[in-house]
Image: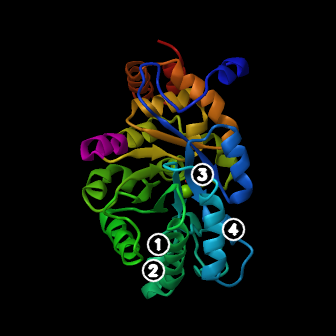
Amino acid sequence: VAASAAAAVSGPGRTADGLPVKLLANIGGAADVPAALAAGAEGVGLFRTEFLYLDSDRPPAFEAQVQAYREVFEAFPEGARVVVRTLDAGADKPLPFVPLGEEPNPALGVRGLRAFRAFDGRNEPVLRTQLLAIREAAGTVAAEVWVMAPMVDEAPEAEWFCRLAAACDLDVAGGRVGVMVETPSSALTAGAILAGPSGFASIGTNDLTQYTMAADRMLGALGPLQDPWHPAVLKLIGAAGAAGEAAGKPVGVCGEAAADPLLACVLVGLGVRSLSMAPSALGEVRAALAGRTLDACVAMAARASGAATAREARRAAAGG
Ligand code: PEP
Ligand code: MG
């Protein structure tokens, strides 16, 4: 889509036949908010909170967290959704105050939500404090604050997270507590996860691609395998999308895949109903959706999912 066409389409995301698809921003803190608002983001689909604390060697204090979260929440108007992800520590984002130990294979190690459940819950107080700080900051703002956990594999983990969030007075019953789907296991069991207390799912296509292709996303040599167009990845996204539709719970995408205008249409065809991306990508994705009906997106998705490789999937989606 040409830049001029992208500029011509504004307002909330929707397909040509009027299906709303929320267009949200990925941010790492308040400094990223002006660009998100300027690009017309309807809210935030991924607030990566660990970016605030990568340099800290001690857990962030409750009050400091409340302030940092409130600064982001306050920038969004009444009803705008702001999805906060709880701390996502791992090999690529080490948090000194969430010790993970030595691991031979960190991409498959104790990371994301696992870091707070492993080691007999040694790190759990850090997560509890974060949830309480999010609750405190959310209490005084107009935006709708949602919370999700990273690196969830199966329903019992999602239930554990929802129990902890409920104990911290977050709105589990109102559907505002959910999980990320970024492993093949959680994509394939999204039905079981969404049958439980989780109110929504957000697909992290960066990790989902890494784990589907068994290709470490940190290794440049394997870059060509880190392609979310791969039909295996698309089928997993389709499984999660279908589970969301069956459960009547929203499923979104917050990985890099959402920023590719053509792939964004395929994602909508797979049942995804919100797309979160770098603000700079919002205009072109908005224009691409506005130019296609839901039926056209579904047809594109079917063609792409049936391909043999990422390259063929891209070509199949674009053609026909
Ligand atoms: C993802 O894995 O797609 C994601 C959005 O999370 P991160 O890139 O922060 O791992
Ligand atoms: Mg991830």
Whether 63 is among the magenta residues is no
Tell me the residue that label 3 is attached to.
76
Tell me the residue that label 2 is attached to.
118
Q: Earlier in the sequence, mark 4 or mark 3?
A: 4
Tell me the residue that label 1 is attached to.
114
Name the spot of residue 276 as percent of width and height, x first: 56, 44
Residue at the spot x=25%, y=42% of the render?
Answer: 246
Name the spot of residue 23 as percent of width and height, x first: 54, 38
Query: The N terminus lies in which quarter of the figure?
Result: top right
- Nearer-the-camera pick, 86 or 65: 65
Q: Earlier in the sequence, mark 3 or mark 1?
A: 3
**Judging from the image, what secondary structure is the residue with disc 1 in?**
helix
Front position among marks 4 and 3: 3
Amino acid type of the residue tagged 1 in the rendering: Arg
Tell me: is circle 2 under 8 Å from ligand 2: no
Front position among marks 2 and 3: 3
Q: CA distance from mark 1 to mark 2?
A: 6 Å
Q: Magenta stretch mostly in which secondary structure?
A: helix
Using the image, determine if residue 125 lies above or below residue 266. below
Q: Earlier in the sequence, mark 2 or mark 3?
A: 3
Name the spot of residue 15 as percent of width and height, x first: 46, 24
Q: CA distance from mark 4 to mark 3?
A: 19 Å
Residue at the spot x=36%, y=69% of the render?
Answer: 162
Front position among marks 3 and 1: 3
Amino acid type of the residue tagged 2 in the rendering: Ala
Q: Earlier in the sequence, mark 4 or mark 1?
A: 4
Q: Are marks 1 and 2 in contact (CB under 8 Å)?
A: yes
Q: Which range of residues does the magenta coloring cover?
A: 239-248
Residue 92 lies in what quarter of the image?
A: bottom right
Q: CA distance from mark 3 to mark 1?
A: 31 Å
Tell me the residue that label 4 is attached to.
52
